[in-house]
Amino acid sequence: DGMLDGIVSIGDVVKRRIEDVEREADQIRAYIATA
C-alpha cells in the first residue's frame, strides 16, 4: 500500500545485529565446551 509503518534507525539495526552476533558466539562457545 506504500504506507510507511515505522522508522528504524541505523542505531537500532546495529544494536540488534550485535545482540545476534553475541548470542551466536555464546552458542558456539557452549557447543565447544560440551564437545
Image (spheres, helix red, strand yellow):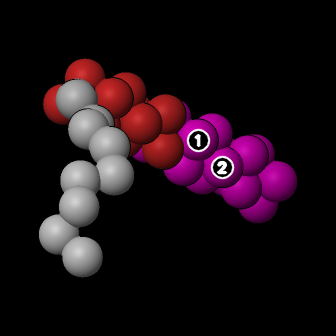
Task: Categorize mark 2 by other alpha carbons within 10 Å: few (<14), some (14-19), many (20+).
Answer: few
Q: What element carries label 2?
A: helix
Q: What stretch is highlighted in magenta?
A: 21-35
In the picture of the structure, the residue carrying the numbered disc 2 is 27
Amino acid type of the residue that numbered disc 2 sits on in the rendered structure = Gln
Q: Does the magenta stretch include residue 22?
A: yes
By secondary structure, the bulk of the magenta-drawn segment is best described as helix
Does any portion of residue 25 appear in the rendered image? no
Q: Nearer the viewer, residue 10 or 27?
A: 10
Which residue carries the number 1 mark?
Answer: 23
Q: Quadrant of residue 31?
A: bottom right
> Residue sitting at 33 percent across and 29 percent down?
12
**Vertical placement of residue 14 versus 28, above or below:** above
Label 1 element class: helix
Q: Does the CB distance between marks 1 and 2 fall below 8 Å?
A: yes
Q: In which quarter of the image is residue 29?
A: top right
